[in-house]
Amino acid sequence: MDETRTKKSTQPQTSPDPAPSPCQARNPVPNARWYGWPDCTICTACFASFGADTALAAAMPLQNYFVADATPCDMYSPRQRARYLAACTGEGTVEDLLAASRERSAVWLETVPAIIMLGAEAERLAGEAEVLAASARVNRLLEAYAGMGSLGDETREEYGTESGVVHRSWDGVVMEREETEAEALREAAGDAHVGAEMTRMEAKWAEVE
């Protein structure tokens, strides 16, 4: 079971927020207020737009409770909303809803945090690659200018690199290194194995979301 659902630091408040923050769906939100149950948390936005006028609204043990731990919303999900409405009408039960929520929470723990982490890392690597590529473009221009300024000068200093390329200025050496590092970062950001793992986890989460 998701520890964020069992180790809650809560503080009741009787009235809902006047302007609920938008639902963050599967992304966990810290220091927020929640409705619902410890195993099925409903953000203030979903409660206001979906749950407030339902038969189970008053029976929820969490009534705009403050939760310090990062917690995801369960009630943005069409599947969960259908189960909730079934519990309201008697076609299902609250226990059915909570059992499904516990199963869903277990899959969430196994997939979503890793998806978020891997996605953020890929974005970071891609961003670093762009910074290096931009710097390399500047250094390429500087080397070109250095070459133009030394035309006909047989005493000009040249700079060799491990790749065997000879540059007319130190800017060229820096450019080559930055281009190599940028390409490595792009490859890491688009790593096929990481992409395949993210796809697998997204598919597993989609089965219960």
Image (tube, rainbow, N blue to C red):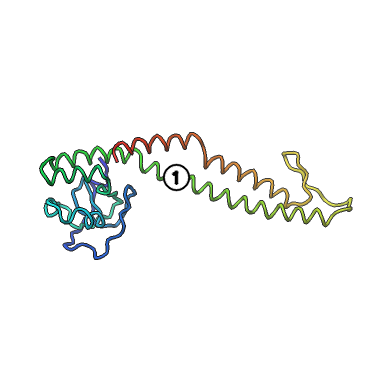
Horizontal placement of 10 versus 145: left or right? left
Q: Position of residue 204 (x, y in %)?
A: 34, 35
Res 103 quadrant in image: top left
Horizontal placement of 147 versus 171: left or right? right
Above or below residue 198? Residue 12 is below
Q: Position of residue 153 (x, y in %)?
A: 88, 53
Q: Quadrant of the C terminus?
A: top left
Q: Residue furthest bottom?
A: 18
Q: Residue furthest left?
A: 90
How busy is the neighbourhood of tag 1: few (under 14 within 10 Å), some, or many (20 plus)?
Answer: some
Residue identified by numbered label 1: 119
**How many labels, in total?**
1
Q: Secondary structure at mark 1?
A: helix
Q: Position of residue 157 (x, y in %)?
A: 82, 50
Horizontal placement of 128 versus 95: left or right? right
The residue located at (59%, 41%) in the rendering is: 184
Q: Position of residue 53 (x, y in %)?
A: 15, 56
Q: Quadrant of the N terminus?
A: top left
Three-letter code, disc 1: Gly
The residue located at (74%, 51%) in the rendering is: 170
The residue located at (26%, 39%) in the rendering is: 104
